[in-house]
Image (cartoon, rainbow, N blue to C red):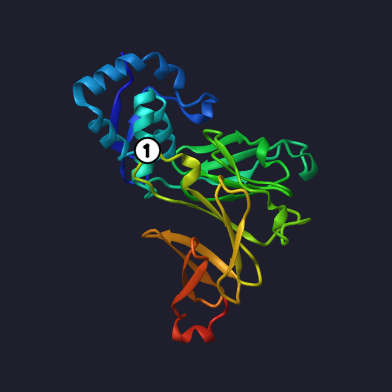
């Protein structure tokens, strides 16, 4: 008999789907994968012959924790394909993010770091993951569970759970990065994921990584499929944050100015001035 999929209230007060026979990441096993793999054929026959794919898609939209989302995708390939399609068509995060921080074993110091990281989840506590790619590198969080790993000579996009990674173009051509200690470099990196309604678009073509330079108002961007970074200058002050909205990129600078820009034409347009009382407030 397969494990039950039930709806119950979460500690945060919202309802979520939970597998009654699944195991936690803290058990050191991949979220009950062994159990569910044995039941794949029964699960597929039941859901696809009785309820159909649309019902499975409906259930996937009501997952409220990253752990349950992973469990859902490990039931079988059909369920996993539904979660992949759901990520493509709906890019609104519905789960609380995990907090990531380095984990040092007893006796370890910075120069002898093993690469382990702990991720804190409000719903299930602390999960420990080994990330050898992050040794002697700087890690920054980004949307939908992906990390940007930045070393002295390389930069890559990594999913710490699936271990899928995509290399970005060499950063040696970016002068502000050459010779810099990645742990203390003040340039900020951001990852934007482009929405796509087609499941045939390769995942790596949906990523755009940005480097916001600290002083001169420049930024650089690249996709994993690019051979080099493209640089552009938008304003005369440094930039603080960037986002994608309605297929347009928006950026805010330290003066509180809001800019809209197009990476295909490499031009920025000032669309909003800072508030009138901005001059009396400290800079961002």
- Describe residue 150's horizontal placement relative to residue 83 as left or right: right
> Label 1, on which residue?
199
Report the residue at 53% width, 82% height from top.
Answer: 281
- Residue placed at 40% from the left, 19% from the top? 36
The residue lying toward the viewer, choosing from 110 and 272, is: 272
Percent of width and height locating residue 112: 78, 39
- Above or below, 239 relative to 183: below
The answer to whether 34 is drawn above or below residue 111 in the figure is above
**Residue at 69% in and 37% down:** 115
The quarter of the displayed image where residue 113 is located: top right
Q: Is residue 64 visible?
A: no
Q: Quadrant of residue 106?
A: top right
Q: Identify the image quadrant of the N terminus.
A: top left
51, above or below 182, in the image? above
Helix, strand, or loop for circle 1? loop
Closer to us: 86 or 222: 222
Is residue 130 visible in the rendered image? The answer is: yes
């Amino acid at each position: 008999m397969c494990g039950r999929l039930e709806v119950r209230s979460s500690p945060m007060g919202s309802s979520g789907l939970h597998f009654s026979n699944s195991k936690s990441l803290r058990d050191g096993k991949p979220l009950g994968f062994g159990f569910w793999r044995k039941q794949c054929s029964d699960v597929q026959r039941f859901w696809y012959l009785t309820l159909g794919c649309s019902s499975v898609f409906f259930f996937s939209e009501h997952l409220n924790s990253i752990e349950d989302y992973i469990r859902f995708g490990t039931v079988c390939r059909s369920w996993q394909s539904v979660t992949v399609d759901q990520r493509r068509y709906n890019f609104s995060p519905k789960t609380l993010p995990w907090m990531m921080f380095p984990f040092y074993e007893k006796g370890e110091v910075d120069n002898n770091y093993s690469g382990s990281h702990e991720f804190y989840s409000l719903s299930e506590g602390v999960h420990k993951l080994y990330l050898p790619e992050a040794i002697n590198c700087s890690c920054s969080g980004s949307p939908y569970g992906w990390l940007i790993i930045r070393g002295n000579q390389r930069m890559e996009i990594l999913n710490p759970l699936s271990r899928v990674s995509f290399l970005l173009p060499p950063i040696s051509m970016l002068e502000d990065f050459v010779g810099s200690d990645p742990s203390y470099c003040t340039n900020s990196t951001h990852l934007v994921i482009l929405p796509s309604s087609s499941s045939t678009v390769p995942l790596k073509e949906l990523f755009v990584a940005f480097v916001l330079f600290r002083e001169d108002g420049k930024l650089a961007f690249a996709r994993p499929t690019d051979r080099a970074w493209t640089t552009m200058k938008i304003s005369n002050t440094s930039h603080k944050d960037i986002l994608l909205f309605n297929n347009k990129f928006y950026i805010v600078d330290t003066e509180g100015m809001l800019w809209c820009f197009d990476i295909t034409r490499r031009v920025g347009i000032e669309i909003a001035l800072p508030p009138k009382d901005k001059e009396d407030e400290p800079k961002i």
